[in-house]
Amino acid sequence: MWFCCLLAVACVLFGIDGIYTSFSQEASTVRFEWLGFGYVPLLRGTAVASVVLGGMLVRRGWSNP
């Protein structure tokens, strides 16, 4: 279960980093032109989902030592 906690903490940290990262529009349009204006909201949603999933994993890892 320690691996679960470690993975969860990494998930939460990368999710928080993704939420507060500022994205350059020039770099995003080169590879993801088909997403259009949905590029940044999609990344923010993925980061939030990562934080939520990480929180659930931390809770599960701590409840089953």
Image (cartoon, rainbow, N blue to C red):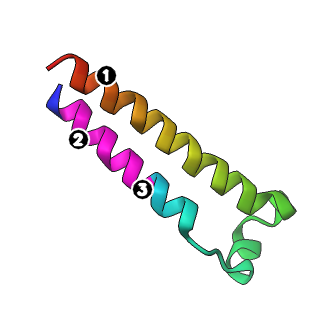
The quadrant holding residue 57 is: top left
Give coordinates of residue 53: x percent, y percent. 47, 34
- Cα–Cα span, label 2 and label 3: 12 Å
Q: Pointer 2 and pointer 3: residues touching (CB < 8 Å)?
A: no
The amino acid marked with disc number 3 is Phe
Q: Residues within 10 Å of mark 2 (few under 14, many from 20)?
A: some
Q: Which residue is mark 2?
A: 6
Element at badge 1? helix
Nearer-N-terminus badge (2/1)? 2
Above or below, 48 against 13 in this view is above
Q: Nearer the viewer, mark 3 or mark 1?
A: 1
- Classified by dominant secondary structure, the portion drawn in magenta counts as helix
Nearer-N-terminus badge (2/3)? 2
The amino acid marked with disc number 1 is Arg
Image point (74%, 56%), residue name: 41
Toward the viewer: 36 or 20? 20
**Is residue 60 part of the magenta span, yes or no?**
no
Above or below, 29 against 2 in this view is below
